[in-house]
Amino acid sequence: MDMFVQDRVGGEYLTALRTVLPNAIVNEEWQTPRQVTITVTADALADVMKTLYYEHYGWVSVVVGNDERPLNGHFAVYYVLSMEGPQKCHIVVRVEVSAITQEWPSVTPVVPACVWGEREVRDMFGLTPVGLPDARRLVLPDDWPDDLHPLRKDAMDYRTRPAPTQDDETYEFINDAKQETTIVPIGPLHITSDEPGHFRLFVDGEDIIDADYRMFYVHRGMEKAAEARMGYNEVTFLADRVCGICGYAHSVAYTTSVENALGVVVPERGQAIRAILLETERLHSHLLNLGLVCHYTGFDSGFQQFFRVREKAMVLAEVLTGSRKTYGMNLIGGVRRDILGDQAIETRRVVAELREDVNRLVDILLETANITGRVVGVGKLDKQVARDFSPVGPMVRGSGFARDTRSDHTFAGYASVPFTPRSHDGCDVLSRTLVRIEEVHDSLNLIEALLDVAPGGRILTEDFEYKPHKFALGFTEAPRGEDIHWSMTGDNQKLYRWRCRASTYNNWPVLRYMLRGNTVSDAAVIVGSLDPCYSCTDRVTVVDVRKHSAQTVPYKEMERYGRERKDSPLK
Amino acid sequence: MFKLLKEILRTGDATVQYPFAPYEASKDFRGKPEHDAEKCIACAACTIACPPNAIHMETDLDAGTRTWSIDYGRCIFCGRCEESCPTGAIGLTPEFELAVMSKEDLTVKAVFQLDHCRSCGKPFAPLKEVEYVGKLLAQTGGETERSAREEQILHTCPECKRKNDLEQVSRMKIAAQMETSK
């Protein structure tokens, strides 16, 4: 590992850290020239995190728990920071948690972005983050046994389904409103995407005063399944299925993490093909979201036009990979299919066609009178809130931060083509939509540029050795923002630990602040602008606490109200 | 509004007539994997490569058979089976219409005979796989026919091979030989 000492990026942060906190760092281990894991003492953890986050422009990517008792007798928690200051790199702050006390000091009070990560570690490993302000479960359901923590190595078989311990939903929703409010529970079904998430809007008349929500109704236990039953190469195909929209981004993030851990050098052509496919995926995802913006604002002909054009991107994916959605193209070490001459010609043809189509449709979209009325100044994501919670993708880029993994960190073939991340300052739904529109054009340009510069040669290398207990990060810029995976190999051709974090995971915690101050009829547009990502539902339940009455409103009715904004179903 | 109407007129009819008209998948579409039992040697490489465990092997020692099966309900059409198959017995097709009326119809099976060890008589490996290995060895050695002795060794299970080897060694009276050579 010493061979790239000269190329290391990020050492300055550690030097600075050692100056202010001389005894904090106990160990330093570099996985790649731009990835370092530092083990810090528990007492210094919060200070280290605060310094790196706020003074050196770090952003929290993910918090990883790991049961390392069979390896070194401790549990460990890894805080992954994406450093986006002058030196772009990843710093992973590792803290060991005693197997006896099973406690470690929470970072959330100083860096709010850690809140979901720490709650998840508590659920999955049964460790206690001391001082964490939010005592509720995040991932596990209310009726899950108290002492069963799925990701502990000695906890359970991955096929175990424990019997429910109680019949009641005990999850407490937080309402910070000062005045009396009416509760509008939505879900476990959701007003925009037919997907399971329980939303509670605390409203005064039509105004949203506060909001809280609960996700993970369809937690699939993928990390456990991957660690328990799949070989490390097969997990690539599971990662493809993390998301129904941006699965390939996960697949690339996963393979990159293992390649980084094992020091695999992927051939340049393989890297370029990965980037081309990632951009193809972004095309169809962004066109879908632009269509949905039309839909939520009551402009359904626009929605149909965008979906018609999006189909061309789907067919392009089929031509290049053999499948419209789950591309199944990756293996550890590269990709499985080359882009041949006629495929490259077809790709250029589709790209040129899409460019014209999208231009015309965007013209129509932005000139439609009621669009501006519905998206300007709506669903504001305040810059400070964004800075505190580390959201990703068009969400954070719509609030003035030009964070984009494609330019911040090197992965796939992006280093070989010019690229500048987009950002808008409006902080509202319009800004996020504009970012997506510009990125559609960027994707089209990137695909052409990558086809131009992709060198010939091999697309896959099998020249590597599986080494036990190596770990590293892998990352991609998915259409919704950074996807990040942390993988540690086992000693049995499997993974010891796989942490897979989808981009929307980082975007949910800020939604609450975006909903505040808007009206109920804007809720659908705001949630839609997050481009949320989870599975299917169909109804909305409305409870009026003042009248102590409950009423179930069909999902279609709630959506209709969001579009037409008359005949409120709440009255 | 005028632009939208123009776009709609320009587009014309965008809906395809499927399922009332055939739908062509692209040339390299990854669809239903087809198994050719004639070529298959029941080596089980595909069962190990298959990420969703759609392909299974079950060995029945009493009947002396090994049953290969694929569950199209679990298949993810990744094509890892095709890549791992040494004889080209399984390959993806552009076929995507897999709906069936009953769930059992999603599973396709093929039964293979096991080879019985010529020493102990117990079944130990699929006959076709043993024959494949025999041919491979012959090809490497540049031979066209196997001697009776080679044939005997080929159809002996690994356990008996070890035992036979040891017995042979003991018959050689190594100790006695070593003494005389002194």
Image (spheres, rainbow, N blue to C red):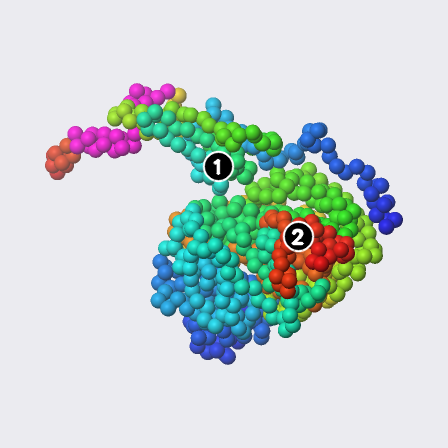
Vertical placement of residue A100 versus A534, above or below: below
Q: Position of residue A208 (x, y in %)?
A: 68, 65
Residue depicted at x 34% and y 25%: B64
Q: Position of residue A472 (x, y in %)?
A: 49, 58
Determine whether the residue tagged by mark 1 lies in a helix, strand or loop: loop
Chain of the residue where label 1 is placed in the rendered structure: B
Vertical placement of residue A150 versus A317, above or below: below
Residue depicted at x 79% and y 57%: A371
Q: Which residues are magenta?
A: B145-171
Residue depicted at x 21% and y 33%: B166
Q: In the depicted view, which residue is nearer to us: A264 or A173?
A: A173
The secondary structure that dominates the magenta segment is helix
Tell me how many marks there are: 2
Q: Which mark is residue B54?
A: 1
Q: Report the side of A303 relative to B137 (left or right).
A: right
Classify 10 Å Cα crowding around label 1: few (below 14), some (14-19), many (20 and above).
some
Q: In the depicted view, which residue is nearer to us: A481 or A448?
A: A481
Q: Position of residue A512 (x, y in %)?
A: 63, 65
Classify 10 Å Cα crowding around label 2: few (below 14), some (14-19), many (20 and above).
some
Residue type at tag 1 = Ala
Q: In the depicted view, which residue is nearer to us: A553 or A162?
A: A553
Query: What residue is disc 2 on?
Result: A553
